[in-house]
Amino acid sequence: MKSTGVVRKLDELGRIVLPIELRNKLGLLERDPLEIFVDGSNIVLKKFETSCVFCGGTKNLEHFEDKLVCSKCMSKIQALKK
């Protein structure tokens, strides 16, 4: 992980502000959804993208029992049913 050298304090509601330079560099726009991960004692923010629950692919997604699944993984699921 690369340090940006930026330090921010949480406000009384637990919010932080991401610097405009960082948002511009990462292509983050106002109201863009961010996904929150925990890795040990680290909090990781990632721009949210809809993806396959199995492989993480983002193309040719279909709904399967309220989950998004790519066509490759869907083929594997269908093969298991036979």
Image (cartoon, grey):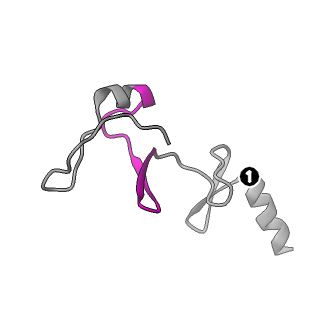
Toward which corner of the image does residue 73 lie, by quadrant?
A: bottom right
Residue positioned 33% across, 25% down in the render:
21
x, y percent for residue 9: 20, 47
The residue that label 1 is drawn on is: 71
Toward which corner of the image does residue 5 lie, by quadrant?
A: top left
**Which of these two is toward me, 23 or 48?**
23
Given the image, on which type of amino acid does mark 1 rest?
Ser
Toward which corner of the image does residue 65 lie, by quadrant?
A: bottom right
Q: Quadrant of the C terminus?
A: bottom right
Residue lying furthest bottom in this view? 81
| Residue at disc 1, secondary structure | helix
Residue positioned 61% across, 60% down in the render:
53
Residue positioned 63% across, 54% down in the render:
52
* 70 left or right, relative to 26: right
* 73 left or right, relative to 10: right
* 38 left or right, relative to 82: left
Q: Please state the extent of the stretch shown in magenta in the rendering.
A: 25-46
Does residue 30 lie above or below 64 as drawn?
Answer: above
**Which of these two is toward me, 30 or 78?**
30
x, y percent for residue 69: 65, 57
x, y percent for residue 49: 51, 45
Graded by Cα atoms within 10 Å as few (under 14), some (14 to 19) or many (20 or more), the crowding at tag 1 reads some
x, y percent for residue 63: 61, 59
Count of all numbered marks drawn on residues in the image: 1
**Which of these two is toward me, 27 or 65?**
27
Membership of 31 in magenta stretch: yes
